[in-house]
Image (cartoon, grey):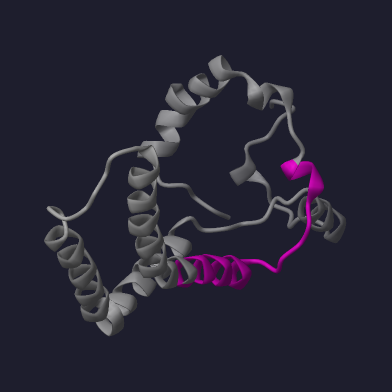
């Protein structure tokens, strides 16, 4: 029999110390689908309750911009920058409620799965993660393709 056993062949439940050690390392069971589901639900709810207002506001702003196309004086980069700033500001104001709703949904779905805890060694920079070649290998290598095509199983 091999010295390293398969995870599925273990007959004993993990000890409390092993569970606590895993939690300290940030090794918790989480679902990638729950935040996705919450995001889709939040977006759908946003569209149901605010979609018409969103479209109407965007339509009025864009109509005003297009009606003024012949009268806009853009002679230098400052004029172009001012126009871009006005359009970007309106877009940011328009999209902010949806972004806040999606962020709140993501945070709530993460908290619902596991209690929040600070695990510094999970966010510590690692030299192997900074290598561009190794990064491409992780994304496009065998493991990356397996993660992309095969759904993850959580125990």
Instruction: In this rendered view, identify the residue nearer to me: 8 or 123.
Output: 123
Q: Is residue 7 above or below residue 15?
A: above
Q: Quadrant of the N terminus?
A: top right
Q: How many marks?
A: 0
Instruction: In this rendered view, identify the residue nearer to me: 143 or 118.
Output: 118
Question: Residue 6: horizontal and vertical position, in percent?
Answer: 63, 37
Query: Residue furthest toward the top?
Result: 133
Residue pictured at 48% horizontal, 55% vertical: 32
Question: Residue 8: horizontal and vertical position, in percent?
Answer: 59, 45
Looking at the rendering, the stretch of residues picked out in magenta corresponds to 101-123
Q: Can you tell which quarter of the image residue 17 is in?
A: bottom right
Q: Is residue 3 above or below residue 110?
A: above
Whether residue 110 is in magenta: the answer is yes
Left or right, residue 76 beside residue 138: left
Residue pictured at 43% horizontal, 23% vertical: 140
Residue pictured at 40% horizontal, 30% vertical: 145
Q: Is residue 26 above or below residue 121?
A: below
């Amino acid at each position: 029999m091999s010295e390293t056993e398969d995870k599925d062949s273990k007959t004993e439940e993990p000890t409390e110390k092993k569970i606590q050690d895993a939690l300290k390392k940030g090794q918790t069971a989480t679902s990638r689908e729950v935040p996705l589901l919450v995001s889709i639900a939040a977006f759908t709810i946003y569209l149901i309750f605010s979609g018409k207002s969103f479209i109407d506001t965007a339509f009025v702003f864009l109509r005003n911009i297009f009606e003024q196309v012949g009268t806009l004086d853009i002679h230098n980069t400052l004029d172009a920058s001012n126009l871009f700033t006005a359009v970007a500001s309106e877009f940011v104001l328009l999209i902010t409620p949806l972004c806040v709703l999606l962020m709140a949904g993501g945070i709530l779905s993460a908290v619902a799965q596991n209690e929040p805890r600070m695990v510094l060694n999970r966010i510590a920079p690692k030299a192997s993660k900074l290598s561009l070649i190794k990064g491409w290998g992780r994304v496009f290598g065998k493991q990356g393709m397996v993660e992309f095509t095969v759904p993850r199983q959580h125990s």
